[in-house]
Image: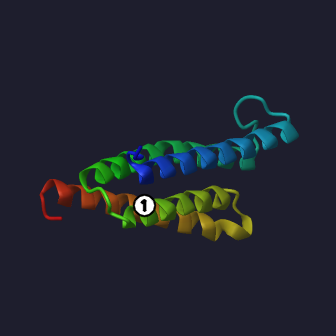
Amino acid sequence: MAIILPTTLGAAAAAAVINFWLANRIGRLRMSEKVSVGDGGHDLLGRRMRAQLNFAENVPFMLILLGLLELARPGWWWLSIVAALYMLGRVLHGLGMDGGSIHWARVGGIAISMVTQLGLAIVAVLVLLKVV
């Protein structure tokens, strides 16, 4: 039996693992700071919550684009590379949201995430226009 949309399936699995990691970081900090609801005025907790929400806001668009492009043009091997880069960007963003000496990771993560997402959107339009 062939796997339908293997690149999208792999990307969705990676996204689920990253989302779990982001949520786990929040949960551990909540426990150590004894904050059950909201951020309790803790800057780091607020940053981590925002990192997970940003992930949840953006990843669905990427997965939809990825899946539709994979359906439209099966065998485009480079989609896997783009998906992996995107997930790397999301991890960097999550780490960088902690601030401090790894602030560069937030900027890099945002850049990677936005370039890959916008790039796939452009490719989708080109497919629609039958340019590629």
Query: 18 or 27, which lies in front?
Result: 18
**In which quadrant of the rendered image does the N terminus lie?**
top left
Q: Residue at x 36, y 45 (%)?
A: 64
Q: Quadrant of residue 129?
A: bottom left
Label count reads 1
**In which quadrant of the rendered image does the C terminus lie?**
bottom left
Q: Residue at x 37, y 65 (%)?
A: 77
Whether residue 108 is situated above or below residue 74 in the rendered picture: below
Q: Quadrant of residue 118?
A: bottom left
- Left or right: residue 51 versus residue 71 is right
Q: Is mark 1 on a helix, strand or loop?
A: helix
Q: Where is residue 75 in the image (x, y as percent from the top left)?
A: 32, 60
The amino acid type of the residue labelled 1 equals Met
- Left or right: residue 28 versus residue 20 is right
Whether residue 69 is situated above or below residue 38 in the rendered picture: below
Which residue extends farthest top? 37
- Residue at image mark 1: 114
- Left or right: residue 115 versus residue 22 is left
How was this image coloured?
rainbow
Q: Position of residue 54 (x, y in %)?
A: 53, 47
Q: Residue at x 30, y 47 (%)?
A: 68
10 Å crowding of disc 1: few (<14), some (14-19), many (20+): some
Which residue extends farthest front? 1
Q: Position of residue 55 (x, y in %)?
A: 54, 47
Query: 81 or 27, which lies in front?
Result: 81
- Left or right: residue 26 versus residue 32 is left
Query: 99 or 117, which lies in front?
Result: 117
Q: Which residue is drawn at 26% across and 61% down?
A: 123
